[in-house]
Image: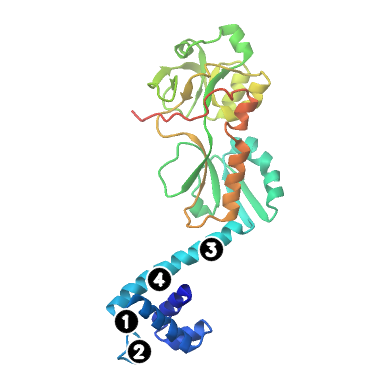
Amino acid sequence: MDVFAALRAFVRSVDLGSFSKAAAEQELKVSTVSRYVSALEADLGVALFNRSTRRLHLTEGGGDFYRRAVAILAEFEEARLAMHTLNASPRGVLRVNIPSAFGRRHIVPHLKDYRDLYPLVRLDVTLTDTVVNLIETGADVAIRIGALEDSTLVARKLAPQRRIPVASPTYLDRHGTPRAPDELARHACLILAPQQGETWYYRATPEAELESITVNGDVRANESEALLQLARDGLGIALLPTWIMADELGAGLLTPLLSDWHWAIATGAERAIWGIYPPKRIVAPKVRTFLAFFAARFGKPPYWERTAQLENTADDDIIIPDH
């Protein structure tokens, strides 16, 4: 007996109310459908239909088996679809939402290589620092940086989000180089304006006790690119993400400070670079390949830390618990 053919014939007979309608739908003989049902009954050792009526009426056992058969067929069809999807070529429009600065540095420069691999994917890229609702806007995937809010979205970690203090050689020549975190209190620090207070957090290892320091400075800015430029200009020490300043570190325009410590500007959940997408039982190939491509392209540790000669520092995020 072809079990799945028999299950389909049985389920559709119940749904349509007759063997003949189920047979017509599946392009089978009525006798074939009847034989499938009889074979199931013989195998199960129970009657699935009451035979005393002209219409099909399920027995108690038939009703229970029908519900289970529907679930089995649904799972089987989903498994088949998943395999077809797995082997299918990525295609169609991929709508991507990306933070502006990160997108310019680490997404857009690699899109040509992605398209070379998957030429049937058409890209619709939006660079914005506004956190949009993926479902409402119809976006397929987004890159988010930092701690994720609780949501129904699915998240894949693409790279760690690390920060280290940096300053220009000019600033350090004038004011000296801090050798321990507590010495930052005596320096001019560049403050990220949305930051709550003027506290930076650090620990020696991911397992060490969390410590904090209150920093001071006369210059604030509401985004990291501005702080990057201000640090290059020698106005103070900035606590910046490694991905935003790899070129400056590699060129010697900025000097990493206290990079043996693990740093953060806020407490809370794990901060990382995430790829997120709406929850679906089967992930479209265009989404799956996009995230896999960039996870591989970033690498471990991410390439911006290797080019900035930070590869010997730990690349694991620290998760700082809320107070």
Residue topped by disc 4: 70
Residue topped by disc 2: 55
Number of marks present in the image shown: 4
Q: Residue at the spot x=45%, y=64% of the render?
A: 75
- CA–CA distance in space, label 2 to label 3: 34 Å
* Sequence order check, earlier mark of 2 and 3: 2
Rendered view: 299 above or below 47: above
- CA–CA distance in space, label 1 to label 3: 32 Å
Residue 72 visible in the snapshot:
yes
- Mark 2 secondary-structure assignment: loop
- CA–CA distance in space, label 4 to label 2: 21 Å
Three-letter amino acid code at the position of disc 2: Arg
Three-letter amino acid code at the position of disc 1: Ala
Q: Residue at the spot x=48%, y=13% of the render?
A: 184
Question: x and y percent of residue 287 in the render?
Answer: 57, 51
* Sequence order check, earlier mark of 4 and 2: 2
Residue topped by disc 1: 47
- Mark 1 secondary-structure assignment: loop
Question: x and y percent of residue 217 in the render?
Answer: 49, 16
Three-letter amino acid code at the position of disc 4: Val
* Sequence order check, earlier mark of 1 and 3: 1
Residue topped by disc 3: 81
* Sequence order check, earlier mark of 3 and 4: 4
Question: x and y percent of residue 97 in the render?
Answer: 57, 46
Question: x and y percent of residue 265 in the render?
Answer: 46, 26
The quadrant holding residue 197 is: top left
Rendered view: 19 above or below 172: below
- Mark 4 secondary-structure assignment: helix
Labels 4, 1: front one: 1
Query: Callout 2: few (<14), some (14-19), or many (20+) C-alpha neighbours within 10 Å?
Result: few
Give the number of the disc on residue 254: none
Three-letter amino acid code at the position of disc 3: Leu
